[in-house]
C-alpha cells in the first residue's frame, strides 16, 4: 500500500483566495481538499485514527484527503483510514497517493466490519439512492443493516453520519423549508429507507450509547456533478428546465466535507439532527437565468413553480458551525465555465426535479 505523504499546507495556502475559475480536475481536487484554519484547529482535537466509512463514493475521497491535509497542516499525527469496497481501483490509488490509508470492506458483512480498526471518531458516508425503483430491497438493506453493524462495532465512538434532506416531505416555500423538528413523512422507497437509516441509528445509539450527529444533506455541488451542473447543462444544451420543484438548497462539496468533519463535535446520544446546506433557498428559475447570462444562452422553461419543494432550514448548523465559505455566485461562475470548456462530468444527475420520491 502506498503511503506517500501529501505536501505540507502552510497557513498562507490555507488562506488563499478562491480562484476566479477552475480549468482542470487537479485544480478542482486541490480546492476541494484545501482545509480552512477552522478545520485545521478542529483536527488537532481528534485522536488517531479517523475512520471514514463509505469513502469510495462522490464525497468520500475528497473528504478523506481534506482531513489528511488538515492534519498535515496542524502537524498532528492523525491517520485517516478510508473504508469502502473500492470497486473503482482509481479512487483507492488516488487516496493512497495522498497519504490516506485504505481498507477494503463489505459493510454488510458483520465479520468484515468487526475487523475494522478501533476509532473514537467515525464519519459515515454510506448510502444507496439511485436505482431504488428497480431494486428497492438493496436500498433498504444498505440504508438500514449497515448502520446497525456500524454502531455495533463503534458503540463508544462519535459518529458524524450523512443522511439526506429527502427524509422530509415537500415543504411550504413560504415557510422557509423543513426544520429538524418536523415530522419525517416523505414519499418514496428511497426517502423512507433514509428515514429508517436514521431510526436504526437512533435505536442503536440509545442502546449502545454511541454519540451521533445526523447530517441531512441538501445537494452537495462540485463541478462534475450536482444540481447546479444539472441546470447549467440543460441551459447550455437548450433543454427545458422543469420548474415544478421550483426551489432548492445546495452547498459546495468542500464546505459540506468540512462541516461533516467538524460535526463530530455535535454528536450526542440520543442523536442530534442537522440540515446541511447553505442557509439560502434558491429559485430554479433565477439560477437558470443567471447561468444563461454566464453561458450566453437563453434558458427555456417547462411548467410553473409549485407552492412546495424539497427545501430545508439550515439556521441550526449555521449557528453551530458558521456559514459555508463558498457562495452561490461563486459556484455558478465555476460551473458555467466548467460546462463551457467541456469539463468532465460523472454522469450522475441529481434528479432534483423529482416530486414523487421515485429515483
Image (cartoon, rainbow, N blue to C red):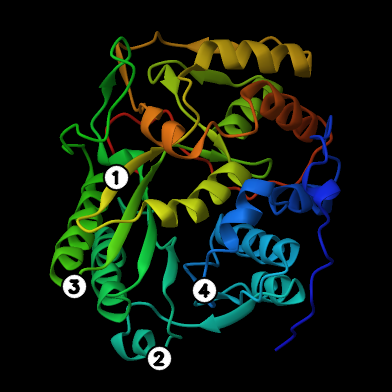
Element type at mark 3: helix
Please give the residue where the numbered disc 1 appears in the rendered image.
Answer: 273
Contact? badges 1 and 4 (CB < 8 Å): no
Neighbour class for label 4 at 10 Å: few (<14), some, many (≥20)?
some
Q: Is residue 58 above or below residue 22?
A: below
Task: Please identify the quarter of the rendering in which residue 340 is found.
Answer: top right
Please state the horizontal and vertical placement of residue 237, each as a whole percent of the image. Answer: 69, 25
Q: In this rendering, does residue 306 appear at all?
A: yes
Give the mark, 1 or 4, whose residue is nearer the N terminus: 4
Give the mark, 4 or 3, whose residue is nearer the N terminus: 4
The one nearer the camera, 136 or 338, is 338
Q: Please name which of the two marks, 1 or 4, marks the residue nearer to the observer.
A: 4
- Gap in angstroms between the C-alphas marked 4 and 3: 21 Å
- Gap in angstroms between the C-alphas marked 2 and 1: 29 Å
Please give the residue where the numbered disc 3 appears in the rendered image.
Answer: 208
Q: Could you say which disc has been placed on residue 150 in the image? A: none
Residue at horizontal 45 percent and vertical 19 percent from the top = 281
Please give the residue where the numbered disc 4 appears in the rendered image.
Answer: 47
- Gap in angstroms between the C-alphas marked 3 and 1: 18 Å
Give the mark, 2 or 1, whose residue is nearer the N terminus: 2
Q: Is residue 195 left or right of residue 322?
A: left
Please give the residue where the numbered disc 2 appears in the rendered image.
Answer: 115
The one nearer the camera, 318 or 334, is 318
- Gap in angstroms between the C-alphas marked 3 and 2: 19 Å
Residue at horizontal 19 percent and vertical 58 percent from the top = 202
Q: Is residue 261 left or right of residue 153?
A: right
Give the mark, 4 or 2, whose residue is nearer the N terminus: 4
- Gap in angstroms between the C-alphas marked 1 and 4: 24 Å
Q: In this rendering, does residue 127 appear at all?
A: no
Numbered-mark total = 4
Amino acid at each position: 500500500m502506498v503511503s506517500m505523504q501529501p505536501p505540507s499546507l502552510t497557513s498562507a495556502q490555507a488562506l488563499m483566495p478562491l480562484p476566479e475559475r477552475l480549468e482542470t480536475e487537479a485544480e478542482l481536487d486541490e480546492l476541494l481538499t484545501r482545509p480552512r484554519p477552522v478545520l485545521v484547529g478542529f483536527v488537532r482535537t481528534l485522536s488517531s485514527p479517523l475512520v471514514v466509512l463509505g469513502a469510495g463514493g462522490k464525497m468520500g475521497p475528497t473528504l478523506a484527503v481534506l482531513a489528511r491535509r488538515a492534519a498535515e497542516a496542524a502537524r498532528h499525527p492523525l491517520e485517516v483510514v478510508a473504508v469502502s469496497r473500492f470497486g473503482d481501483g482509481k479512487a483507492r490509488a488516488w487516496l493512497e497517493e495522498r497519504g490516506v490509508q485504505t481498507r477494503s470492506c463489505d459493510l454488510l458483512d458483520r465479520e468484515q466490519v468487526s475487523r475494522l480498526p478501533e476509532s473514537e471518531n467515525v464519519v459515515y458516508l454510506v448510502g444507496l439512492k439511485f436505482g431504488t425503483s428497480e431494486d428497492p430491497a438493496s436500498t433498504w438493506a444498505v440504508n438500514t443493516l449497515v448502520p446497525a453493524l456500524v454502531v455495533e462495532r463503534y458503540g463508544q465512538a462519535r459518529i458524524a453520519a450523512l443522511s439526506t434532506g429527502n427524509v422530509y416531505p415537500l415543504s411550504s416555500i413560504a415557510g422557509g423549508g423543513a426544520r429538524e423538528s418536523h415530522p419525517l413523512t416523505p414519499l418514496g422507497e428511497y426517502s423512507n429507507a433514509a428515514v429508517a437509516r436514521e431510526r436504526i441509528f437512533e435505536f442503536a445509539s440509545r442502546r449502545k450509547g454511541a454519540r451521533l450527529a445526523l447530517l441531512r444533506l441538501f445537494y452537495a455541488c462540485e463541478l462534475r456533478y450536482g444540481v447546479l451542473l444539472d441546470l447549467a447543462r440543460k441551459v447550455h444544451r437548450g433543454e427545458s428546465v422543469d420548474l415544478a420543484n421550483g426551489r432548492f438548497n445546495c452547498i459546495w462539496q468542500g464546505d459540506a466535507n468540512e462541516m461533516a468533519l467538524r460535526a463530530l463535535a455535535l454528536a450526542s446520544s440520543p442523536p442530534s439532527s442537522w440540515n446541511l446546506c447553505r442557509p439560502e433557498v434558491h429559485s430554479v428559475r433565477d439560477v437558470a437565468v443567471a447561468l444563461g447570462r454566464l453561458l450566453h444562452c437563453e434558458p427555456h422553461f417547462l411548467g410553473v413553480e409549485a407552492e412546495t419543494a424539497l427545501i430545508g432550514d439550515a439556521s441550526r448548523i449555521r449557528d453551530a458551525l458558521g456559514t459555508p465559505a463558498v457562495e452561490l455566485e461563486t459556484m455558478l461562475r465555476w460551473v458555467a465555465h466548467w460546462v463551457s470548456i467541456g469539463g468532465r462530468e460523472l454522469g450522475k444527475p441529481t434528479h432534483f426535479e423529482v416530486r414523487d420520491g421515485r429515483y
